[in-house]
Image (tube, grey):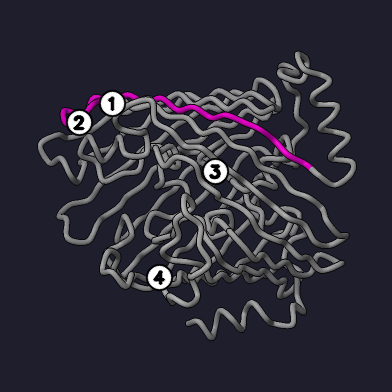
């Protein structure tokens, strides 16, 4: 497997990845760009630019020189009718991130986060606390200060390949689609990165993408399976506990690679030397298509053979709607089963993201979990959420 991945990363890069490299909808590159790049945004407000024009003019001047950055804050509150657990959760994420175009084809990307919880249980674990085998608030935890990105990206002059080396987040590019971001799309892990993939935390790694033809591409990665972004280290390749992935995909055009996309992802994660994590591996399939730059139907499925991933098998389907105000509505349904637990669990999530301005979004959401696997005495759990995002 490692030989296959190394070969994919070093294929003379005779084909091409997209011009934007490996940056998906939840990446720094995407967060630095307002709008979705395919619709004509008609924002309701210019907030917060209109209250601090000098600050944004200064940022614009830096961007002209190749340095772009944002400071943002996300908050998520959730409440549930589960008859187990606390019944409510809230947390926030403060982030400083950006990129520096150091050379014509090379750039440095960074992201520092502080993830903190306002309640005893963070939204990421509210579903588990209530008896559902479900991550109901992906990324909204209490992990503290984290270095989640610090990597160099090198691109071909014609955009024919891209390579990332450093502190990477594999969820930026592994098995993604247009609605994958937990900051602007679905909140439940069932509709983010496939819940059958045991993706590691952000850590040291290398990833590369190549174009195989006018419509086909390959992306591969090798990264630290034991990564801890709160305590970054460089011992990953000497320890030998690695996460590896290989994705082969089809797109209508490389400027739409994460909007019109069909792909197959293969992955493998080594067992931890201390016995805290067993070996795991599996495959995932995803198909999503941006119809008329308005509707995005999707179908996603995955299976794993180990016990470390959240689910053993998972199938998700749904629909996204993109409005002119860059509003976004999403509806998704997931079926899942877990190794060692009898029964099936169904999850429904619906949300509507109000884009007040390029720097302010408000997203109410509803999650309905039928037959929660960890609470067989309750038929279903309903969870309401409200997420906000403000960018400076």
Identify the residue at horizontal 77%, vertical 57% (top origin).
107
Question: Separation of disc 1 and disc 3 at Cα?
Answer: 22 Å
Task: Look at 44% across and 59% down and name the residue there.
Answer: 200
Q: Measure how far apart labels 2 and 4 are at the Cα level.
A: 32 Å
Tell me: residue 165, above or below residue 359. Answer: below
Can you identify the residue that label 3 sits on? 181
First in residue order: circle 2 vs circle 4: 2
Magenta-colored stretch includes residue 84: yes
Front tag of 2 and 3: 2
Q: Report x, y in % for residue 130.
A: 22, 34
**Mark 4 lies on residue:** 269
Q: Which numbered circle lies on residue 85? A: 2
Label 1 with label 2: CB-CB less than 8 Å: yes
Q: Which numbered dot is residue 380?
A: none
The residue located at (76%, 54%) in the rendering is: 255
Q: Secondary structure at mark 3?
A: loop
- Nearer to us of marks 1 and 2 is 2
Mark 4 or mark 3: name the one nearer the start of the chain: 3
Task: Name the residue beneath numbered marker 1.
Answer: 80
Query: Could you tell me residue 125's position as x and y percent?
Result: 32, 39
Callout 2: SS: loop
Percent of width and height locating residue 390: 62, 25
Kindly state the secondary structure of the residue where label 4 is placed: strand
Q: Is disc 1 surrounded by few (<14), some (14 to 19) or many (20+) residues within 10 Å? A: many
What residue is drawn where x is 54% and y is 83%?
4
Q: Is residue 183 left or right of residue 143?
A: right
Question: Does 295 lie within the magenta span?
Answer: no
Q: Exactly how many numbered labels are in the figure?
A: 4
The residue stretch that appears in magenta:
68-87
């Amino acid at each position: 497997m490692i030989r296959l991945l190394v070969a994919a990363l070093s294929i003379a890069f005779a084909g091409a990845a997209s011009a934007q490299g490996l940056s998906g909808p939840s990446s720094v590159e995407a967060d630095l760009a307002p709008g979705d790049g395919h619709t004509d945004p008609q924002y309701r407000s210019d907030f917060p630019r209109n209250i601090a024009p000098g600050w944004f003019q200064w940022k614009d001047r830096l961007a002209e020189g190749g340095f772009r950055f944002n400071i943002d804050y996300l908050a998520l509150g959730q409440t549930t009718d589960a008859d187990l657990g606390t019944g409510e959760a809230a947390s926030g994420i403060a982030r400083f991130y950006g990129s520096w175009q150091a050379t014509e084809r090379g750039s440095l990307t960074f992201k520092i986060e502080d993830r903190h919880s306002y309640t005893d249980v963070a939204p990421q674990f509210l579903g588990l606390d209530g008896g559902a085998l479900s991550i109901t608030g992906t990324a909204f935890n209490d992990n503290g200060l984290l270095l989640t990105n610090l990597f160099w990206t090198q691109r071909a002059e014609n955009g024919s390949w891209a390579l990332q080396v450093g502190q990477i987040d594999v969820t930026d590019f592994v098995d993604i689609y247009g609605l994958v971001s937990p900051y602007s799309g679905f909140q439940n892990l069932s509709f983010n990165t496939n819940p059958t993939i045991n993706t590691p935390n952000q850590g040291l790694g290398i990833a590369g993408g190549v174009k195989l033809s006018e419509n086909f591409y390959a992306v591969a990665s090798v990264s630290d399976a034991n990564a801890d972004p709160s305590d970054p280290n460089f011992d990953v390749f000497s320890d030998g506990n690695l996460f590896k992935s290989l994705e082969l995909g089809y797109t209508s055009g490389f400027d739409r690679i994460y909007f019109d996309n069909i792909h197959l992802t293969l992955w493998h994660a080594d067992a931890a030397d201390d016995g805290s994590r067993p070996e795991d591996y599996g495959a995932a399939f995803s198909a999503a298509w941006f119809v008329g730059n308005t509707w995005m139907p999707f179908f996603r499925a995955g299976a794993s053979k180990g016990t470390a991933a959240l689910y053993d098998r998972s199938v998700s389907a749904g629909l996204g709607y993109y409005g002119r105000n860059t509003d976004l509505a999403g509806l998704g349904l997931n079926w899942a089963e877990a190794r060692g637990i009898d029964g099936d669990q169904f999850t429904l999530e619906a949300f509507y993201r109000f884009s007040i301005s390029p720097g302010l979004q408000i997203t109410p959401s509803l999650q309905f979990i039928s037959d929660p696997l960890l609470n067989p005495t309750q038929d279903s759990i309903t969870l309401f959420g409200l997420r906000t995002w403000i960018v400076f």
